Image (spheres, rainbow, N blue to C red):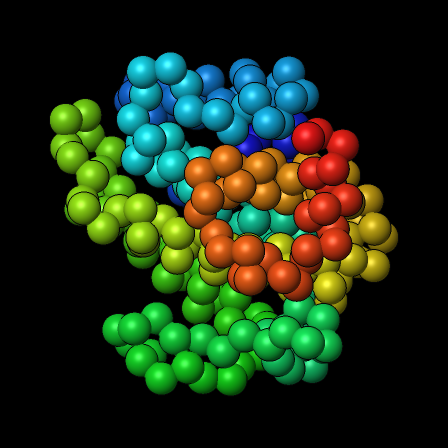
């Protein structure tokens, strides 16, 4: 969310996904920003009274895509084919890419390649009006929540890779407060609506416990 980064000009990895001004989703985004400004993340992620859960998940999914896009954009110089020949999150976790359409059988690839595939795939889902309708009155599809869960599960992997493989660079760039706030917001959100299986969160389980224990 832009409030996290102030007005700093930061390169994003992929073009930012904008929510149209004047739309109901834009109002929801503004509501989220205002609530986040209060500093209480547990409260900030709760479904606002009278709002549609699908729409709330959609707005926040777009927002997390933009945040991760910006965070990864700051460390792309350090995440290269040479430094990260595999998409990993520590020594125990390695991810192989498949999207079910263009690449059906999971392939081993470097982290920058994997994240490029992943962010392009997410962007395609967010741009698909049948999945993420931006016009008022257009219903969300029946499979919306399962698509959103897959997007969030995959976006988590970018956080996991950054924390495990590039945290030194994040500290060097003085971005750790942004990264931690963004990730904490993300975790509170997925916990609130049970959007990612616990086993998928295992690569960052210790960090998740540390970040969330103060707010129980």
Q: Residue at x 55, y 23 (%)?
A: 44
**Residue closest to the eye, 115 or 159:** 159
Is 174 placed left or right of 16 in the picture?
right
Q: Position of residue 68 (x, y in %)?
A: 56, 49
- Residue 83 appears in the figure: yes
Q: Quadrant of the N terminus?
A: top right
Q: Position of residue 211 (x, y in %)?
A: 73, 41
* Displayed quadrant of residue 151: bottom left
Q: Position of residue 63 (x, y in %)?
A: 47, 38
Location of residue 212 with respect to 197 vertically, above or below: above
**Residue closest to the eye, 148 or 24:** 148
Q: Position of residue 16 (x, y in %)?
A: 46, 44
Q: Residue at x 49, y 56 (%)?
A: 197
* Displayed quadrant of residue 19: top left
Is 24 placed left or right of 36 in the picture?
left
Location of residue 67 with respect to 165 vertically, above or below: above
**Residue closest to the eye, 104 or 40:** 40
């Amino acid at each position: 969310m832009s409030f996290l980064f102030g007005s700093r000009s930061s390169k994003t990895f992929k073009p930012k996904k904008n929510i149209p001004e004047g739309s109901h989703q834009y109002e929801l985004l503004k509501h989220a920003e205002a609530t986040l400004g209060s500093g209480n993340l547990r409260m900030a992620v709760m479904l606002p009274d009278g709002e549609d859960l699908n729409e709330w998940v959609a707005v926040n999914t777009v927002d997390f895509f933009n945040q991760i896009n910006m965070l990864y954009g700051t460390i792309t110089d350090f995440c290269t084919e040479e430094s990260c020949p595999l998409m990993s999150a520590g020594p125990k976790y390695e991810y192989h890419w498949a999207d079910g359409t263009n690449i059906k059988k999971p392939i081993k690839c470097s982290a920058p390649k994997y994240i490029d595939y992943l962010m392009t795939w997410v962007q395609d889902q967010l741009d698909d009006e049948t999945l993420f309708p931006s016009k008022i009155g257009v219903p969300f599809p029946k499979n919306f929540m399962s698509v959103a869960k897959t997007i969030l599960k995959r976006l988590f992997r970018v956080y996991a890779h950054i924390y495990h493989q590039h945290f030194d660079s994040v500290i060097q760039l003085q971005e750790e407060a942004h990264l931690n706030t963004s990730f904490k917001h993300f975790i509170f959100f997925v916990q609130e609506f049970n959007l990612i299986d616990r086993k998928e969160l295992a690569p960052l389980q210790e960090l998740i416990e540390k970040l969330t224990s103060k707010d129980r």
